[in-house]
Amino acid sequence: MASIRRTLSQVYQDRSYQNGVASAQAHKLFSTNNNSGKYSSLTSTSAVAAASVYLRRKGFRRSFYRCTIFFILGLLLGIFPFGQVDTDINKHDFSFEMKPPHVNVQLDTKDNFALAAVSLGVEKTTPQLDRFSRFDYVERKELIVITPTYNRALQAYFLNRLGQVLRLVQPPLLWIVVEMTSASAETAEILRKTGVMYRHLVCVNKNNTNVKDRGVHQRNAGLEHIERHRLDGIVYFADDDNVYSLQLFESLRNISHFGTWPVAMLAQSKNKAIVEGPVCNASQVIGWHTNEKSKRLRRFHVDMSGFAFNSTILWDPKRWNRPFSNPIRQLDTVKEGFQETTFIEQVVEDESQMESVPPSCSRILNWHLHLDAHGLVYPRGWLLQKNLEVVQPIK
C-alpha cells in the first residue's frame, strides 16, 4: 500500500519544544516509513491545530496593536485641533424680538390728524441681569438702642409702643433692654412678640438700696455690654415713656462721631411745651435752648434722648485720639438733670465736635412728655380671684 510523504510545514521548522528537542527531530517524526499510516495522520492533525492556535494569537496581537495606534492618534488629534473654530455667538445671530408687520396708514390731508404710535399689544422688555437687581441691599450703620425699664402700671404699653416703632426701622438694629434686679418673664414675652432683634440684660448691683437713679445704672450696663462685645454702630438712649418719630432713627445713621438735636417736652405744670437742645447753623452747633435757671450750671443743655454717638468711642479710644482710656459711664453721684452734661463731657470736648440732626435742627423728632401714671396698682394677672356678687338671670 502506497504512503503519502508530507514535508514539515515551514511554520514548525524553527519551533522548539519544552523537552529541548530540535526541529530536526520533528522532521524525523514526519519522515517515518510507509507502513506507519496511523502515526502520520495523527501528526498532521496536531500540526494543523498548533498552526491555528498560533495564527489566532498573532491575529489578536495585530488587532490590539492597531486599536492602540488609532486610539493614540485620535487622542492627539483631539488635543491639538487643526484650524480655528469661532465659538463667539453674537446677539444678531439669535433674535427673539417680535416685530409687528408693517402697517400702511393713509391719511387725508384735509383733516388735522396725527398718529403718535401704533401698538399691537407686544412690548419689548429687556430684563436686567444685575446681581443686585433681586435684592434691596443698602449698606447701613447698625443702630444700638438702649432702653432701661422697670415694673410699673404702664410698662407693657410703653414697651409695646416703642417696639412697634423700632419694628418699622430699616435693619440692622439692636434693641438692648435692661432691667434692674431680674429679667421678668412678662418683659421677655413682650420683646419676643415685637419682632425686633433684642438683648435682654439685667443690671447687677450689689447695693440696690443706695441707688439714686436706677436709669443711670441700667444704661451703664448697656454700655458695658457694648464695650465688652465691641459692637460697632450708633448708640442711642431711648427711654420707653418717650415718643419717637421714625425719621429720627433713620437720621441717626448719618452721625459719624456725635450728633444732637432739640427735644420737645412738657413743662412741670404740663400746660405748655418747651424745647431743650442745640441751636444749629447748617450742621454746626452754635448755641443751646435752655431756661435761665440752668444756663450757668450746665455745660451742655440737652435731654438724655437728644443725642447719639459712635459706639467705637467706648472701646477704641486711639481711633478718636482720646487722652485717657477710662471707661465712659454715666455718673450716679451728680444731681438729677446733670447726668447728660457730665456724660457728654467724656465723649466730646466742645461743640465743634458735634453734628446737628437733622441739618439746622429744623424739626422736632421726639417728645419727652412725662406722662407716667402715679398711684396706679400694677395688675398681678388677668384672672379674677372673686366672682361677681350679684348675678341677674336672663328673663
Image (cartoon, rainbow, N blue to C red):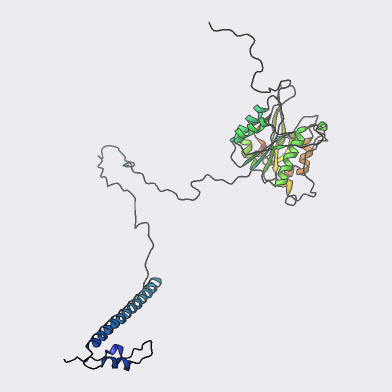
Given residues 116 and 55, the one toward you in this image is 55
**Residue 34: quarter of image:** bottom left
Residue 151 visible here: yes
Q: Is residue 219 left or right of residue 29?
A: right
Q: Whole-percent x and y of residue 226? A: 71, 44
**Residue 35: quarter of image:** bottom left
Q: Quadrant of the N terminus?
A: bottom left
Q: Whole-percent x and y of residue 50? A: 30, 82
Given residues 335 and 51, the one toward you in this image is 51
Residue found at the far left of this picture: 1
Given residues 384 and 91, the one toward you in this image is 384
Identified at 36% across, 44% down, the residue is: 123
Examine the rendered structure and indicate whether residue 117 appears above or below residue 294: below
Q: Whole-percent x and y of residue 391? A: 60, 9
Q: Whole-percent x and y of residue 135? A: 51, 45
Examine the rendered structure and indicate whether residue 331 appears above or below residue 318: above
